[in-house]
Image (spheres, rainbow, N blue to C red):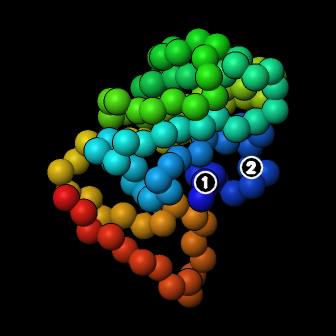
Amino acid sequence: GWCPLSPTGAQTTQLLVQPPWRPAVLWDWVTLTCQGSGTAGATTWYKDGWHWLKKGSNHVTVTESGTYTCERPGRGLSPPVIILNDPLVLQVPGQVLLEGDTVTLRCRG
C-alpha cells in the first residue's frame, strides 16, 4: 500500500512512496505519487530544492538519489522524501510508529 510520510492532515499535499519502506533506496525502483486536490497534470516536482519537472504527471519513477518534494496548485509543498543510493540499508515500514508497536526491520544490500 501507499504510506504518507507525515501524519494525515499535517499538510494538504502528500508525497507517497512505493515500495513503502524507509529509507527509500534507488535500487528499489521507487515511484513517487503527489497526492492532493487540484488540477490533474499540474504537479510541480522539485529535486534537491530545484525545479525538476514542471506541470507533469502526479506519478514519477525516481532514477537519481536526492531529496524530492512536489507541489499541487494552491495546496503547497509536500514534506520531503529522501531517496538513497546506499549499498547497505536498514529499513522500517513506511508507516507512523508508536511506542510499543511491533516492527519488522529489513537489512538489505
Q: Which residue is mark 1?
A: 2
In percent of width and height, residue 91 lies at 36, 64
| Residue at screen point 42% across, 78% down | 104
- In-image side of 17 versus 35 (left or right): left
| Residue at screen point 72% across, 25% down | 72
Q: Which residue is mark 2?
A: 10
Instruction: Note whether 62 is above or below 9 in the view shown.
Output: above
**Res. 82 image quadrant:** top left
Identify which amino acid the numbered label 1 is placed on: Trp
Which quarter of the rendering shows the C terminus? bottom left
Q: Which mark is residue 81?
A: none
Identify the secondary structure beneath mark 1: loop
In percent of width and height, residue 95 lies at 57, 64
Residue 55 seen in this snapshot? yes
Which quarter of the rendering shows the N terminus? bottom right
Instruction: Note whether 93 is above or below 100 in the view shown.
Output: above
- In-image side of 73 versus 14 (left or right): right
Tag 2 near tag 1, CB within 8 Å: no
Mark before the other along the chain sequence, 2 or 1: 1
Identify the secondary structure beneath mark 2: loop
In percent of width and height, residue 80 lies at 53, 39
Instruction: Note whether 59 is above or below 108 in the view shown.
Output: above
Identify which amino acid the numbered label 2 is placed on: Ala
Q: CA distance from mark 2 to mark 1?
A: 17 Å
| Residue at screen point 52% across, 61% down | 94
In percent of width and height, residue 58 lies at 63, 28
| Residue at screen point 37% across, 42% down | 29
Characterize the local packing of mark 1: few (<14), some (14-19) or many (20 or more) Cα atoms within 10 angstroms: some
Residue 78 seen in this snapshot? no
